[in-house]
Image (cartoon, helix red, strand yellow):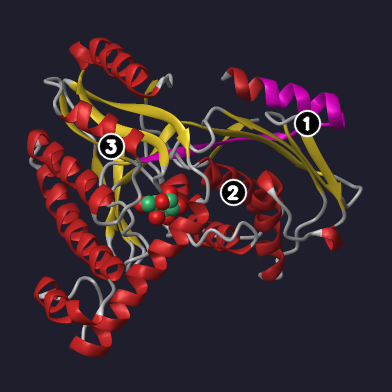
Amino acid sequence: MNPIAANVATAFTAAYQHTPQLYFSPGRINLIGEHVDYNDGFVLPAAINKGVYYAVAANTSGLINISALDYNEQISIPFSDINKTSGWRNYVLSVVNEFLLLHKNIGGFDCIFSGDIPIGSGMSSSAAVEGGLAFALNEIFNAGLSRKELALLCQRAEHNFPNMKCGIMDQYANLQGKKDNVILLDCKTIEHQYYPLLLGEYIIVLINSNVHHELVTGEYNLRRKWSGDGLNILKNNAGVQSFRDKDIAGKLETCKASMSSEEYNCCKYVIEEIARTQLAVELLAQNNLRAFGQLMNATHLGLSKLYTVSCKELDFLADYAATHEAVLGSRMMGGGFGGCTINIVRKDSTAQFIEAISAAYLQQFNIKAEAYIVETSNGVEKIAP
Ligand code: GLA
């Protein structure tokens, strides 16, 4: 058994003297389609083999007992005390709260979790925390929600107590992931298709900048507002329905004068990224990884210059990688302002690439980068008993 899972199981039995159900809840990568999941776009994420392990069982005390092993912190509260709070508690309690808002009959439970996703790395530890608990409660208390409904519940949970107005990508990938596949998710219809991730002589390497700039939630919500306000101007002034309309790029130009520069740039990025993602899926199906990588590089540029969610450390990592002969594509991944870049790297040069980029990064910023070679995995699943 995975050592973290074993640890969680042992800690559970020691703390609560009964046997839990064990679950694995994955983090995610996203190949392309960034910051468009809340803009009617398409995204191409996959669940990965890094995530959060949960041990959960119903109890007879009627209390919510949750212990976050990695923080060495716990809560023990009655349902009547569920409220917005801070840190990891906000994520788990918000999930329980969403079940209550649906009038699902959730009883007291004991729960311990621990994981191996570095916080703020852009691999969505928050969705892994939410999805693992939601899946476990759904199963243990027979709440009858589908994986899709659970993903939507977790998204609402993240909007609610943590006040992060995220799109649906992370929660969806966490619950609907499929090993060896990426998910093409249409964020307008919330329908998906799987595409086999056939990388041949290439692999996916994440480089963690190990920086996590403050105010990410506020900045994220602001981008959401700028693109949303921009879309409203397009709707009111040019009869646009969504960022997917035909001739949308031309209509954006006709509305430019009515927009702030932030609104215009965000809309421009979104329109371009939706087109890039659609093209990228075709290229992946044709196994044209080289052209796919070029699109990833273009995404980074857009995120950095138009959507302004990058930072100097991520720009450095993406620029460095883009000029490395073994790298097909590189870009910042996830919400931004720190965290990881995602890179498609030739297998035989991976060690050399990691060494070179880490040395250059250390020299530039005096920060140690970390590298992770990630594999795809299934969405949340029970691993024992
Ligand atoms: C965060 C959010 C997602 C998505 C990405 C950016 O991870 O949780 O919904 O918007 O940022 O693509």
* Crowdedness near tag 1: few (<14), some (14–19) or many (≥20) residues, C-alpha within 10 Å: some
**110 on left or right of 103:** right
**Tag 3 near tag 1, CB within 8 Å:** no
According to the picture, the residue beneath numbered tag 3 turns out to be 315
Q: For the residue marked with disc 3, what is the amino acid? A: Asp
Q: For the residue marked with disc 2, what is the amino acid? A: Glu
According to the picture, the residue beneath numbered tag 1 turns out to be 19
Mark 1 vs mark 2: in front:
2
- At x 43%, y 64%, the residue is 222
Q: Secondary structure at mark 2?
A: helix
Q: Secondary structure at mark 1?
A: loop
Q: For the residue marked with disc 1, what is the amino acid? A: Thr
**185 on left or right of 170:** left
Q: Residue 142 appears in which quarter of the rendering?
A: bottom right
Q: Of label 3 and label 1, which has the lower sequence position?
A: 1
In which quadrant will I find the C terminus?
top right
**Residue 130, disc:** 2
Q: Of label 3 and label 2, which has the lower sequence position?
A: 2
Residue 131 image offset from top left, x and y in percent: 56, 48
For the magenta stretch, what is the residue range?
7-29
Residue 10 image offset from top left, x and y in percent: 75, 21
> What whole-number distance in Å separates the C-alpha atoms at marks 3 and 2?
30 Å
